[in-house]
Amino acid sequence: MSEHSGLTRAEIEEFWDSWLAGNREAERTGDWRMLADWYAEDASYGWMYSHDEHFMAVGRDQIRDWAIGIEMDGFDGWHYDYQVTVIDERKSMIVGFWKQRSGIVNDETGGEYEILGIGGSWFGVERQTSGPDEGQVKIAWQRDWFDLPSTAHTFMEIVKSGKAPESLLKRMKVAGHGVPGHYRYKDLTSSLWPPPVERGDYITQAPGQAPGGAAEEAR
């Protein structure tokens, strides 16, 4: 059982199974906004594009409209197949590793265009203690990572093939700090690391000594 949220492994696994089923339905319909119901009302969801361009959505509405709305529009036919899942029931955390496949056939290989990098999502789940979701298990925070250079390469290969749908071409133009949810590091609306991790709730190893004793001097 979780030390922090009182969730059992069975409860986390049940929630995760429902999440996987929800993902398949979103892929089928092409509308990822339906997954907003899996998030807590005050959840945060972020990832990194570059050292000074980050995405962050805070609250279920921003997650629906931005993270799984604007950011996922144009990926019709794409599927995100989870390859392996790691669950830590003591911390109520889930890490899922996925492959990004486009549903568009590469005539040279006969397979789908695929982003050849390791991608994944790191989740913290909690039982809600108040409000309309009281008693339900929801995602409290999510942080993603993916191979951006490989993503850009695959996009360009699809474009060069002449098979890029108009929806994907439009999505490729959605970039930069002017897009909702895109922030410079100093302006992030939630911490880059998940809030409880940033607070130090799960410190595994104390900071090492910097060369020349800089870490000690900084104290």
Image (cartoon, rainbow, N blue to C red):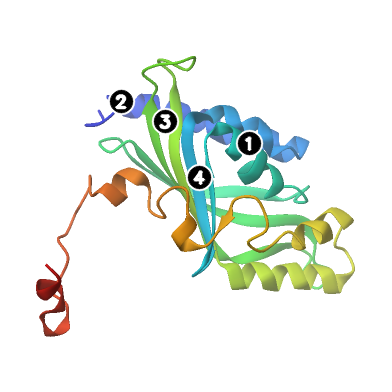
Q: Amino acid at mark 2?
A: Thr
Q: Earlier in the sequence, mark 1 or mark 3?
A: 3
Quadrant where the C terminus is found in the figure:
bottom left
At 42% from the left edge and 55% from the top edge, which residue is drawn? 192
Disc 3 + disc 4, Cβ < 8 Å: no
Q: Secondary structure at mark 2?
A: loop
At 15% from the left edge and 78% from the top edge, which residue is drawn? 214
At 58% from the left edge and 27% from the top edge, which residue is drawn? 37
Total numbered circles: 4
Q: Earlier in the sequence, mark 3 or mark 4?
A: 3
Q: CA distance from mark 1 to mark 3?
A: 23 Å
Q: Earlier in the sequence, mark 2 or mark 1?
A: 2
Indicate the position of residue 114 as horizontal and vertical percent values: 68, 63
Indicate the position of residue 119 as horizontal and vertical percent values: 53, 58
**Structural crowding at the residue carrying mark 2, measured as other residues with C-alpha within 10 Å and reported as few (<14), some (14–19) or many (≥20):** some
Residue that label 2 marks: 8
Q: Earlier in the sequence, mark 2 or mark 3?
A: 2
Q: Amino acid at mark 4?
A: Tyr
Q: Secondary structure at mark 4?
A: strand
- Label drawn at residue 47: none
Indicate the position of residue 131 as horizontal and vertical percent values: 45, 16
Residue that label 3 marks: 13
Tell whether 181 sits left or right of 168: left
Q: Residue 182's image quarter? A: bottom right
Q: Earlier in the sequence, mark 4 or mark 2?
A: 2
Q: CA distance from mark 2 to mark 1?
A: 28 Å
- Label drawn at residue 45: 4
Tell whether 56 sits left or right of 173: left
